[in-house]
Image (cartoon, rainbow, N blue to C red):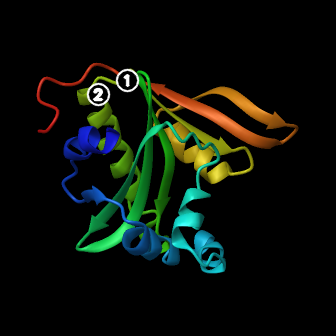
Amino acid sequence: MLEAQILPLLISPELTFRRGDLKGSVRNVCLACSRYRKLFTEYANAREWAESLSYERDADADRALIAVTKNCEDIALLELVSAGDTLTIALLLVSSSSRFHGIGRACVRAVENAAKVAGYAALSLGVHSTNNEAMTFWGRAGFSDCGFLGRGDHGILQMERVLDRPFANAQS
């Protein structure tokens, strides 16, 4: 199970990573994120809304929903999916008040280091082609374009980052 494998490897000096729960951490982060607050309140069932987040659902996929906290406050969500030697970041959602403070970057570093230690060869993700802010963020994080799903100007840009071998002591 991905959660049991990757969660203990997620390490950051300023953040705490724990199993995400749909009625607590998912709700807290989504209500604190201006982009998702309206969508979240339109769904009567938090599970239904959370399951609609990923653009690609595979019932057999090994996935983990991870809450990210700082100073005991839920500030971000990560959804990771294991597919062979690639770990996919299906979701990185940072609350509005925590954006532009290095939280997303710290999450990506922690996921990258954990993936290396766990033996993954690459990280991958998809970004809506109209989300220029996200494409810039992921490009700066070392991800490069590797394909496009969709038609015309609207679709999902596939991005990937090949991982180097882990450091001898990845936790330091």
Name the kind of residue labelled 1 in the image. Leu
Mark 2: give few (<14), some (14-19) or many (20+) Cα within 10 Å: many
Quarter of the view holding residue 6: top left
Residue found 59% across the figure and 45% down from its top = 136
Residue 80, how many percent across, how many down? Answer: 43, 43
Q: Is residue 74 left or right of residue 154?
A: left
Q: Look at 62% across and 53% down and name the residue there.
A: 133
Q: Quadrant of the N terminus?
A: top left
**Which residue is pictured at 65% across the width and 78% down the height?**
38
Residue under label 2, please give it: 116
Is 132 left, or right, of 92 in this rendering?
A: right
Q: Residue drawn 22% across and 59% down?
A: 14
Image coordinates for residue 172, horizontal then vertical, percent: 11, 39
Horizontal side of residue 152 vs 69, given as left or right: right
Q: Nearer the viewer, residue 72 or 134?
A: 72
The spot of residue 118 in percent (x, y) is: 26, 29
Secondary element type, mark 1: loop
> Residue 130, how many percent across, how many down?
74, 50
Q: Circle 2 sits in a helix, a strand or a loop, which is it?
A: helix
Q: Nearer the viewer, residue 41 or 105?
A: 41
Three-letter code for the amino acid on which mark 2 is drawn: Lys
Q: Quadrant of residue 69?
A: bottom left
In this view, the residue in front, 106 or 73, is: 73
Q: Are marks 1 and 2 in contact (CB under 8 Å)?
A: yes
Circle count: 2
Residue found at the very far front of the displayed protein: 60
Query: Where 80 falls versus 44 (above or below)?
Result: above
Q: Which mark is residue 163?
A: 1
Q: Is residue 126 above or below residue 160?
A: below
